[in-house]
Image (tube, grey):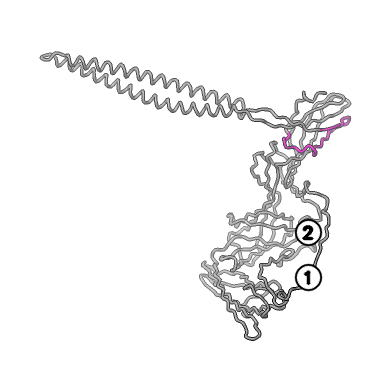
Amino acid sequence: MSDDQDLVPAPSRAARVTLFEDRAEVTRAAEVAIAAGASWIAIGGVSPFVDERSVQVKAAGDGVRVLSARVRFHTHQERSLGREAIEALEVEERAARDRHAAMGKAIERASQALQRAQALGASFCKLVSEAPRGSGAEATIASLRAAIEAVDASAAGALRDGAAAREGQLAANDDLQRARARLAEGRVEHPRHEAWIEVQLTSDAPRAVPLELTYRVPCALWRPEHLVRVASATPAISAKAPLEIVTFATAWQRTGEAWDDVAIRFSTARPARDATPPPITDDVLTQRRKTDQERSRIEVDLREQAVMVAGLDRGGHAVDEMPGVDDGGEPLLLSPAEKVSIASDGRPLRIEVGRVTVEATIDRVLFPEIARVAHLRATATLTRGGPLLAGPVRIARGQSLVGRARLDFVGKGEPFEVGLGTDDAVRVRRAQTDQRETTPVTGTQKIKRAVKVYLSNLSSEARRVVVTERIPVSEIDDVEITLTTAGGFRRDGKDGFLHREVDLAANATQTLEIAYELRASSKVVLPM
């Protein structure tokens, strides 16, 4: 064919799809018949959002060569419903119209019957008034009375038939209006956008040529998601328990293509990112002398500091070097065990891409300053499978879903933790009191703070819980913080965390207490 306007697109099917974080790479397969020499062919089934710059075509067989490829976009008007659906609506509309006309005729017949009955009733009433009085008149009057009753019954029947016909006509009119509205909506034409990939081939002889087309398209993406399950609904504390981690790839696509029974892959690569490093600019530092007011006093700021660690400070590493999220720039490629189908409706579809079971230690932890209930926490090392990508996590204990969480990136051999929901049986109440003093003459400032933690076990079984408290940590020599009452807590001197394991008997309560003193010189301005 020499004129591309006469091309009829050949069918194709999606054979393989690779989903990225913001697009997809589709590989389609088709088979076309070509003549000897150079010729143009068209391949249909392609998304109208196809990226023209990414189109690649491969032809199988000796003596066949691909000369060029291009994308041609087409727009034509298309009705909202197909021909069969419109014909069915037309039949429904005609049936409703016929019922409406039949009910109208029934109303007319009932009206005519009522008029006849009323006319007969008037005639019989006149005959009754003109009937002679005396002997023998009773029989005549009785026959006229029976005739009037028959006429009244006929009039009542006509009224009932008319009412039923009018009710049926209203229902038929409603059906007719709905059918007409659906038919009008189905006949509305909308522009339909289509795309073809036109390929120019050359061949030394007429033959059927298998083609493979690869291109990228937006409106498709995926995100990782996990399901973490512990086998028991009430796992034993401070004991090893199997922790099952199922990784899903949640995929969406609204490309307009049919992805039925395709080999799908999920990639962490970012083909849209700029590969050129950013330019380096100068970072200029300046200095100035402090003012007299700044030299005479020190302003201290109390701030919340997130403790950043590479991995956990608990658990053991199974490898010497922990891989990062990028792992040296090599992207990850995840694949399910079987082919899948993803409809082009924009709805999420979860596809399992990994499953691993590791041994985890279960603890019951309590942070009185943050939450008033205890939580179950699993600490494990990813000794098999992996890595685990960052994403949302659904938590299950036994056969019940108990909550949702989020998991950061976990490399193979790296320790990690995940929450397993709350233990409502352990409750806590926290009270804090402050006492401020200033030493005469020297002006030394002292702040004494006492914290009491009231624990309650509302269950009929004993509970072991790890309680975590904290005290401030000073970064300057002019401010000193001393723990005066430890209350059985172990102190982490670097970050200021206090930990204590507490055994609560059934239906028991216990009070924990810590106290610390903050001492600062007179020139320090404290925020508390």
SS for tag 1? Answer: loop
How far across and how far down the image is residue 203, in percent?
87, 27
Disc number placed over residue 323 in the picture, else none: 2
Q: Where residue 223 sits in the image (x, y, percent)? A: 69, 49
Q: Residue furthest bottom?
A: 441
Q: Bounds of the magenta span? A: 46-69
Amino acid type at mark 2: Pro
Circle on res. 288: 1
Residue 192's image quarter?
A: top right
State yes or no: residue 143 in magenta: no
The picture places residue 74, in percent across and down from the top left corner, at 72, 30
Q: Of the residues shown, which amino acid type is indicated by label 1? A: Arg
The residue furthest left is 135
**SS type, badge 2:** loop
Is residue 188 depicted above or below 497 in this figure? above
Q: Is residue 78 left or right of residue 316?
A: left
Q: Nearer the viewer, mark 1 or mark 2?
A: 1
Considering the image in quadrants, where does the N terminus appear? Answer: top right
Viewer-proximal residue, 465 or 123? 123
Q: Is residue 57 magenta?
A: yes
Q: Earlier in the sequence, mark 1 or mark 2?
A: 1
Mark 1–mark 2 Cα distance, whole angstroms, equals 43 Å
Q: Is residue 70 visible?
A: yes
